[in-house]
Image (spheres, rainbow, N blue to C red):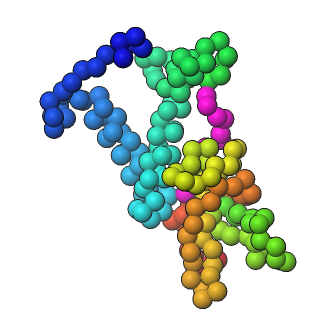
Amino acid sequence: YRSNGITHITTNGYASMENGLAERFNRTIRDDMRTNLLDSGIDNRFWPYVMEYSSMIRNKLILKNKDKSPEQMIMEHYFPGTGRKQFISHVFKSFGRYGIWLDASKKVSGLEMRAHHCFYLGPSEYPCADEAPVLGGDKILVYEKLKDGLYHATIKHTRNVKYNKPVRLFKEISLENF
């Protein structure tokens, strides 16, 4: 580790008081996560997506004592002289933002049969678990209406989303009105 500039320091087990910086960062991410969950109105079972979204936003914020974002510092270390400042360029939207997803894979006539209501969960360049990434697209929560009238929630990676203006979030939408 020393050849890479890493110093290994051990702390006492179960002594979080000795690890204040990491504990503060974890608390900040948890606070961001709670805020996004409450503000969007999305169900708590989607907390891993909110945590991923909050971490991505934090990694793009410029640190006041460094005048760079954590992502910029990593890019300069691993790709020196390239001028790249970020892994990917993505226009972030409000977590839980309402949109319409056009399912291009369905071969049915009529737009209403292929269009589904969806909500923004983050960029798809960072897939969760074994989901396939779609570069330059969005990770969305899609509610598909089943034949019995109930809705089934699934996570999709796509570019075929039209977001409404003004911005509407999950908490402002009623599934009964779809």
Question: Which residue occupies 49% across, 26% down?
Answer: 70
Q: Is residue 108 left or right of residue 135?
A: right
Residue with the most extreme right position? 109
Give the quadrant of residue 114: bottom right
- Residue 93 falls within the magenta-colored stretch: yes
From the viewer's side, name the closer residue of 81 and 62: 81
Q: Is residue 69 visible?
A: no
**Can residue 53 be seen?**
yes
Q: Position of residue 1 (x, y in %)?
A: 36, 17
Is 31 placed above or below 148 here? above
Task: Report the residue at 58% width, 54% height from top.
Answer: 131
Q: In screen coordinates, is 161 left or right of 132?
A: right
Q: Is residue 64 above or below residue 177?
A: above
In the depicted structure, whether residue 31 falls above or below residue 6: below
Q: Nearer the viewer, residue 173 or 30?
A: 30
Q: Main secondary structure of the magenta part?
A: loop
Q: Which residues are magenta?
A: 86-98
Q: Position of residue 167 (x, y in %)?
A: 63, 56
Identify the residue at horizontal 53%, vertical 32% (top origin).
Answer: 60
Residue at x-position 61% and y-position 66%: 142
